[in-house]
Image (cartoon, rainbow, N blue to C red):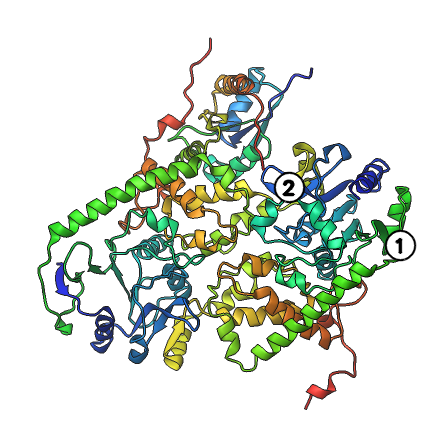
Amino acid sequence: MTLYYKLGDFKEFLISLMKNNIVDAVVVPMRGLTENSFSPFLIKDIELLKNCEPQSPIMSINSARALSQLTAKGAIPFKVAAVMKPCEVIAFRELIKLNQVNPENIITISFDCNGVNSLKDINSKREICEICTGFTPDNADIKIFSIGIESPVIATDIELSSLNLEQVEYNKESRENFIKEKLDENIKKRENKLLEIKSNFQNLLKNCIVCKNCMRVCPICFCQECFFDSPALSGNSVTYTLRANRMSGLSFPENKLLFHLGRMNHMSVSCVGCGACEDACPAEIPVSQMFASAGDELKKLFNYQPGRDIAEKIPFTCYEHDELHSFEQPYLEKR
Amino acid sequence: MQEALNNLLEKSFSNGSIDGALIMSEIDSGYSYVYYTNFEQIHNISPFQPVMKINGAKVHSAITRENDNRTKILFLMKPCEIRASVELKKLNQVDLDNSILLSYTCPGVLEFKEGNSFNDSEKFIENFINGNLYDNIREVCKSCINFSGEGADITINLFDKSFVALTAKGEEFLKSANIDYKTSFEPDDNYEKIKKIRETNRENLLKEYKNFFKSDDKIVEYFDKCIGCHACSHSCPICYCRQCYFESDTFKYYPDSIKRKVDYKNALRLPLDRVMFHIGRVTHMATSCVGCGMCEDVCPVNIKVSQFFKYMGTNIQNTFNYIPGINREEPLPLLTFKENEFQEIED
Amino acid sequence: MESWEPKIVYIMCSWCGSGGAETASAFNLKYPENIKPFRIWCTGGLDPAYILRAFLEGADGIIISGCHPGDCHYDVGNYYARRRFAALKTILKNFGFDENRIWLRWVGHSEGKRLVDTAEEFNEHIKKLGPHKISQ
């Protein structure tokens, strides 16, 4: 059963989770050594926790990826609360489906998110955050609500009575109205932005150097060896010469379109819209928006939302006997 | 110079001394290397375009790593790319027997987006050969003193517009195409002027970095913004490992290791081993670092990786008295030894 | 003026797809020579990246044929193939590529005529569309 508590200070709440042994450590963003440097930290020391910034303005890496790295060889052997933005929680849940993270002993905490700033220009918001349609913490174990209500509220099924928090009523209707308004606005912006991207696709990829940074920082792209780096696409002087003969010259860096369209085919259905890719691109290509465009189409096709239900299988891992007939070529036998 | 080059290409294709050529060209999406397999395909070449979207040595490796001993290919690349190719030959990643390496006196390289749409390379070169050093080129280019094309079979001296044969193979190639050439590189005043400025820049860089890295916490500060994406190593021509050691199972920790780490340090910055990766990469490849600067340009958080590697690389290379990529016969420093050396570091 | 011959790749599974080709040859049916057959074990094992590769390497058209859904030699491979193929077509269409140059038509082991008709129909279809030009 979901209970609602008053949230005083976010940091104090995290500290009290540790003091009351609900968790032994917290994964939360904190500042690095230099200006505007933020990173997720796994913190066990309550004194250090006083310096954390749970709603950091910069998301240098997708925390789901960090948790995946930490649990590569097994569950974390102590209880951890992971403070993550809504998109990171969705990525975490997708990674559970893909067997790439061990969620045992991890409690996720999320909040109503206002977006993060770009690593390229810290004074402006990430472009993908401007058109985000998943800014509420629907999928987290502990949800912090703040949109459209006077003071923030904790919503959770997790047993927190030992913290002695004040139970409250909150203005559900007001919050839902605010959310609907923002969502409608963002959906419209998204439609317009993605239309621009769609119609300008090849031109936008002009400066791509196929460094594949976007794939490396993506939380969903988990393959140890990416198909597009693998021997499947390698050649030797004979095959390169044959292909160059056919195509009247082969350009390098190679496989630019193949990489982007191929990666879209492989993972855009699970794309969480975090924007790690757009910030990682050295040529400032709007990769996150391209993948949002492809991803939105596939999510519509399969009626799929990443992260909404852990039992909901990723579309390429299941099937219906009778579906998608519009993609099969109809046949009229010629007599 | 373009005409002479076209002449060379036409003759070499027709007399069979090459079956293919890799040359920077203008294509729909900007400027990229294009692999041509006959002279008629060659269009819109821009061989001296000041852009490097991929280090040419990587392309060389992709094409010739599994070589067939039959396809003879000409590679027209920048001096650092040539040197990287020579290093890769020592690492068995490239075939040089069937390759002709052609280089030129390089003015430096612009950052990707600018370089990819830069349509004035002729003027750029002209300014360069009149003794002007550019301010908007890669930092490591400003301190590069090996920019004449040493290490290649042939280099083009843009200052006096001559082909220079640097090896016997290069000489034979030019002879069979009936092209005039010199047998040694003749630097002129403008070349020396630029070289001097770059030497000074290099000295300053080494001094500045030596001053900065006074204590061992400075490296943590230097790489503070690093997000562990490994873009630097994947764009590096020398980092050829299919599976990087730092991405292997060795660096995936078991739960009890994680517990021990957290208990010992009280907090762990994620992702793990970010600074370790850089220090480790230095020990693995800095002896062969050619200072091309790809690593810094691909870094999403603008860490000056290439300048760091230039500093570390130069120091390490000086210890072994080794310049990567200049001498094909010289073995890699860590793959050879003398019985009596470095006694000063032993107990 | 040289008449242009489409470069078409016909991807067939090893069971029904190739079986269809065998049946066609048993009846002495022929399909156009510019169509290159490419045999894979099962359409379910076809990564859409390979179709994209052919598409971007100069193929003017690609046809995929496998066992009818429900009849897959490996039980359910073709169901997965159908999903992947639907995703591929959707993405290509989204970004303005010509998704009509890729067809999916199931062909049973005994349906020799269906296979040959498909090949001919597709050949005519591509001839009408013209050569495929993709800029790198």
Residue at image position (40%, 30%) is C71
- On-image quarter of the N terminus of chain B: top right
Residue labelled with disc 1:
B168
Q: CA distance from mark 1 to mark 2?
A: 30 Å
Q: Which residue occupies the foreground of this view, B256 or A258?
A: A258
**Is B129 positioned to the left or the right of A176 in the image?**
right
The answer to whether residue A126 of the structure is visible from this angle is: yes
Q: Is residue A333 above or below residue B86?
A: above
Q: Which residue occupies the foreground of this view, A226 or A289?
A: A289
**Mark 1 residue type:** Ala
**Is A19 positioned to the left or the right of B270 in the image?**
left
Location of residue A318 in the rendering, given as x and y in whole percent from the top left corner: 35, 41
Q: Quadrant of residue B196?
A: bottom right
**Is B86 positioned to the left or the right of C107 in the image?**
right
Q: Which residue occupies the foreground of this view, C51 or A216?
A: A216
Q: Are marks 1 and 2 in contact (CB under 8 Å)?
A: no
Q: Secondary structure at mark 1?
A: helix
- On-image quarter of the C terminus of chain B: bottom right
Residue labelled with disc 2:
A251
**Subunit that carries the residue with mark 1:** B
Q: Residue furthest top?
A: A335
Residue at image position (88%, 58%) is B184
**Is A280 positioned to the left or the right of A321 in the image?**
right
Location of residue A106 in the rendering, given as x and y in whole percent from the top left corner: 29, 65
**Mark 2 residue type:** Ser
Q: Secondary structure at mark 2?
A: strand
Residue at image position (44%, 26%) is C106
Residue at image position (23%, 60%) is A141
